[in-house]
Every structure is written in C-alpha cells, then in structure tokens.
C-alpha cells in the first residue's frame, strides 16, 4: 500500500503520529517534573504539526 499512498497523505499521517507522540512525551515530562523531556515533547509536537501542515498544503496544491 505504501507505493500507492500519495505523499500528502503520508505527511499528514506521519505528522499526526509525531504530534500525538510529542503530546504524550510532553505530558510525561510534566508529570515526572522533567523539563528536558517536556521540552523534547514540545519540539516533537511542533515538528509533527509542521509535517501535517505540509501534507495539507500539498493536498490543496494537488501535489
């Protein structure tokens, strides 16, 4: 299926997964009072959001 999946769909799915993982990592860092883990989660969440947005733009642009 990977061969047939459009790049914009891949970016949206992977971005959403990264965003969710980042949210969990951020919450875990907050729960155990680990600011570094919390920051890593925040960064991961932002990277995922950016990747998801790229997929959305590609969809609109028809790429």
Image (cartoon, rainbow, N blue to C red):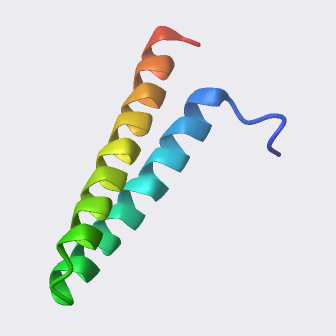
**What residue appears at the point 33 percent right and 72 percent down from the top-left corner?**
25
Q: Residue 6: x and y, percent? A: 68, 29
**What residue appears at the point 29 percent right and 66 percent down from the top-left corner?**
23
Q: Is residue 12 left or right of residue 29?
A: right
**What residue appears at the point 30 percent right and 51 percent down from the top-left corner?**
43
Quadrant for residue 41, please give it. bottom left
State the residue in front, 35 or 47. 35
Q: Is residue 51 left or right of residue 63?
A: left
Q: Is residue 36 depicted above or below 14 in this figure?
A: below
State which quarter of the image contains the C terminus: top right
Q: Residue 34: x and y, percent? A: 21, 80
Q: Residue 14: x and y, percent? A: 54, 48
Quadrant for residue 54, please give it. top left
Quadrant for residue 3, please give it. top right
**What residue appears at the point 41 percent right and 66 percent down from the top-left corner?**
21
State the residue in front, 25 or 10. 25
Q: Is residue 4 left or right of residue 48?
A: right
> In the displayed image of the protein, which residue is found farthest to the top?
61
Q: Is residue 59 left or right of residue 34?
A: right
Q: Residue 15: x and y, percent? A: 46, 46
């Amino acid at each position: 299926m990977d061969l047939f999946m459009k790049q914009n769909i891949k970016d949206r799915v992977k971005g959403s997964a990264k965003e969710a993982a980042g949210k969990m990592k951020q919450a875990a860092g907050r729960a155990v009072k680990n600011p570094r883990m919390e920051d890593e989660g925040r960064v991961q969440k932002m990277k995922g959001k950016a990747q998801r947005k790229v997929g959305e733009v590609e969809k609109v642009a028809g790429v």
